[in-house]
Amino acid sequence: MIGSYWIASIFIEWKKLSTQAVTQQRRYQVFFLALYSMGLRLSEGLNLTVQDIDAHTMQIHVRNGKGGKDRLVPLPQRTLNALRAY
């Protein structure tokens, strides 16, 4: 059984590495922001299209997510602004 201390220490190390390996390319920064802020899986983020973004209702339509299901995900204002700027 994995202890919570072990999981916490792994997370702390991952955070250290992720802050050291910050990407400099704007497209990757926007992509990672979208994944993180909306809680998307990598495959869901890669399959997003412009037509999936509804700025009026502030939602993203995720198609064929886990289990082949579609879902609506809230779109944070910061993420929308970053997508528009890119």
Image (tube, rainbow, N blue to C red):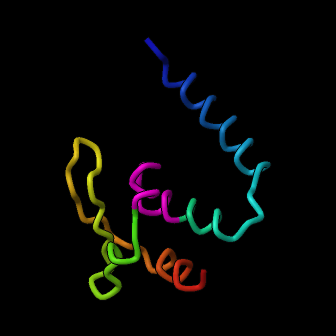
The residue that appears at 39% across and 54% down in the rendered structure is 44
Asked if residue 51 lies left or right of residue 31, the reply is: left
- Rendering coords of residue 17 (x, y %): 74, 42
- Rendering coords of residue 38 (x, y %): 41, 62
Q: Which residues are magenta?
A: 34-47
The front one of 9 and 17 is 17
Toward which corner of the image does residue 86 lie, by quadrant?
bottom right
Does residue 67 lie above or below 76 as drawn? above
- Rendering coords of residue 53 (x, y %): 35, 76
Asked if residue 1 lies left or right of residue 82, the reply is: left
Tally of marks? 0
Q: Is residue 37 magenta?
A: yes
The residue that appears at 30% across and 88% down in the rendered structure is 56
The residue that appears at 79% across and 49% down in the rendered structure is 20
**Residue closest to the far bottom:** 56
Asked if residue 64 lies left or right of residue 42, the reply is: left
Asked if residue 29 lies left or right of residue 55, the reply is: right
Does residue 56 lie above or below 47 as drawn? below
The residue that appears at 59% across and 85% down in the rendered structure is 85
**Residue closest to the far left:** 69
The quarter of the image holding the N terminus is top left
Does residue 75 lie above or below 23 as drawn? below
The front one of 15 and 79 is 79
- Rendering coords of residue 69 (x, y %): 20, 50
Q: What predominant SS class does the magenta segment belong to?
A: helix
Does residue 46 lie above or below 29 as drawn? above
Q: Is residue 19 magenta?
A: no
